[in-house]
Amino acid sequence: MDRIELRGMSFHGRHGVRDAERDQTQEFKVDIEIDADLAEPGRTDRLADTIDYTQVRAAAREVIEGESKKLLESLAAAIAERILTMPRVKAVSVRVAKSPASMQPIEAAAVRINRTRA
C-alpha cells in the first residue's frame, strides 16, 4: 500500500476540557497519513486519479475551526471520519496535538488514531 503524508498543518480552534481552553483559540497541529493505491496517478500524472491534498487539509481545518470538542480524541476521530469518505482512501492515521497552557512545561499533548475503511 502507498502512503500520502501531510505533516505540520496548523489551525486554531477552541477545544479542551476546561472552560478556559474553549474561551480563547489555541493552536492545533495536525499530521495525516493516508494509505491508498497510488499506482494509477503515478502513471497518469492526473490529479483526478489521486487524493487531492487540498481537500484533506480542508477537512482537517473544518474540524479544528468548527464545533468545540473536549477531547483531542474526538477531533482526531472527526477528521479521520471525513477523510475515510474520500474516494481511494483505504486507511488513515491522524495525529492532533496542542500545547496546553495548564500543563506547562510540556511541548505538546497529542493523540494519534488509525482508522480503516470498512
Image (cartoon, grey):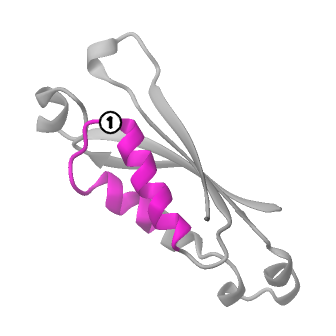
Q: Is residue 98 magenta?
A: no
What's the residue at 50%, 56% (across, down)? 80
What's the residue at 47%, 20% (across, down)? 107
Q: Nearer the viewer, residue 10 or 55?
A: 55
Count of numbered badges drawn on the protein: 1
Badge 1 crowding class, 10 Å Cα cut-off, few under 14, some 14 to 19, many 20 or more, is few
Place of residue 113 in the rendered image (x, y in percent of width and height, measured from the top left): 55, 42
Q: Is residue 20 left or right of residue 117?
A: left
Residue range corresponding to the magenta coloring: 58-85
Amino acid type at circle 1 is Leu
What's the residue at 22%, 29% (across, down)? 17
Tag 1 residue: 71
Q: Is residue 66 magenta?
A: yes
Look at the magenta stretch and give its main secondary structure: helix
Q: Quadrant of the N terminus?
A: bottom right
Q: Is residue 101 left or right of residue 1?
A: left
Q: Quadrant of the C terminus?
A: bottom right
Residue 48 vertical position relative to residue 35 in the rendered view, above or below: below
Residue 86 vertical position relative to residue 4 in the rendered view, above or below: below
